[in-house]
Amino acid sequence: MSTVIISGTQWGDEGKGKIVDYLASQANVVVRFQGGSNAGHTVTVNGEEYKLRLIPSGILCKDTLCVIANGVVFDPQVFLEEVETIKSRGIDTSNIRISNRAHVVMPWHKIFDELNEELRGDKKIGTTKRGIGPCYIDKADRIGIRVCDLIDPEEFAARCREVLTQKNFILRKVFNHAPISYEKVLNEYEIYAEKIAPYVCDTITLLNEEIDAGKKVLFEGAQATMLDIDYGTYPYVTASHPISSGVGVGTGVAPKKIDKVFGVVKAYCTRVGEGPFPTEQLNEIGDKLRTAGHEFGTVTGRPRRTGWLDACVVKYAGQLSGIDYMAVTRLDILDDFDEIKMCVAYEVDGKILNEIPASLKVLARVNPIYETFEGWKSDISQVKTYDELPDNAKKYLERMAEVTKIDLGIISVGPNRDQTIVVAENIFE
Ligand code: IMP
């Protein structure tokens, strides 16, 4: 048995796609377990860039089974667009499987995502407007439509009529918004249903059988710890569980079947959307990080907020997800900095905190305690082994491991597969 989870440790956009792609080349199965098309994983293979939103990053490895499990909210329109794009670049998509229990993103979810954000005014969350939150709301409200309903024409027609009656009532009475046409949705989704049906199966049985047969299975987290609905900076979070525990409910694979957890840590920090960000640099340092790291959203194109690495947040992620190894990404982005800072503790009212405050009011007031590191001021993008890294880069990494209490596993020094330094060998053994 060999199962590995990859989870983001910060606010997303840590470069998980690249790490998943690297590990996927050793895996037989790659699984998405939460989130939906709000994710944007950029993977570069042989200098060619691929942007994936719903399909697991394993699709770029030949013969890897790619599973969209039940915890994902599945947007058939985005999925089919992605399939077409990938196919047009010569990649086989027949290895994709979609859970029959995944909830389907419907047109009203996207409309409500927009309207709810408008209603929140200056308290808006800054969502990706992909209908993710409203789809999870309907799941909890027991009025969601699942993939198994979508591919059953009679059931879909009935469920769609029932739910749309309720949604149109709210659209009219609360938002003074034009109703959504039942016929239009039915016609559009009937076409999707036909196209996705060949990919649909019971992924719970599939995954458990693969694991029991000794296959190597990689669980690909989207978003990240600080966006987790329970553990993140609520309410400025997404609607799912990106932490490792999300795999259990999101796939039907029991916790005791998980072997290792990798936490992806960007060498500095970014965030999109609203909410507190203690190490944010609203100055020329933040601008330099944004420019050097091309920090603009894959899904929305929004400029990302940027700041120094917050080791308190990474340590918290380690605790929550039981992280065995860190995969540090984008270390090369810091190549040109004279000095680099790392937040190693939070102080509030003269006291050092032992936890991440639940209250956003308190989190907004924390004073990050920084340690300063001398930059390495050299191009590390072609470095192939840990020993070859400049001493100042090693000092930074080793302090990161010490503060977070997580071992170094992988160091990424560029977007390509061959720009990956492996510290922990035989990850799937
Ligand atoms: P939602 O997931 O679209 O509901 O957005 C909720 C919050 O999560 C917003 O702050 C988004 O910017 C953030 N978010 C969602 N997906 C991602 C992601 O893949 N990377 C970074 N932030 C994300």
Image (tube, rainbow, N blue to C red):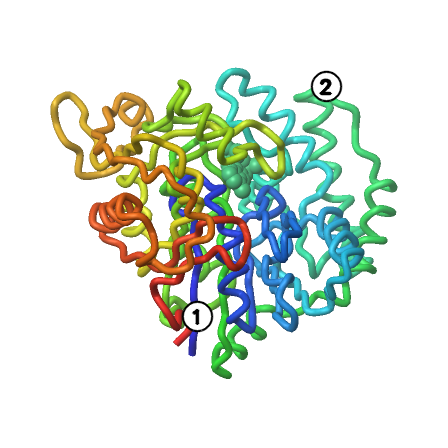
Locate residue 244, reporting x and y percent. Answer: 40, 56
Residue at image mark 2:
176
In this view, the residue farthest toward the bottom is: 213
Identify the residue at image location x=44%, y=70%.
3
Which one is in front, 122 or 399?
A: 399
Question: Left of 224 or right of it: where is 324?
Answer: left
Identify the residue at image location x=66%, y=21%.
174
When the figure is inspected, residue 277 is found, relative to residue 194, above or below; the finding is above
Question: Left of 140 or right of it: where is 87?
Answer: right
User: Alpha carbon of mark 1 to alpha carbon of mark 2: how far?
Assistant: 49 Å
Q: Which amino acid does label 1 sit on?
A: Thr
When the figure is inspected, residue 6 is found, relative to residue 309, above or below; the finding is below
When the figure is inspected, residue 253 is found, relative to residue 382, above or below; the finding is below
Q: How crowded is mark 2: few (under 14 residues within 10 Å), some or many (20 or more)?
A: few
The earlier-in-sequence mark between 1 and 2 is 1
Q: Which mark is drawn over residue 3?
A: 1
In this view, the residue farthest toward the left is: 350
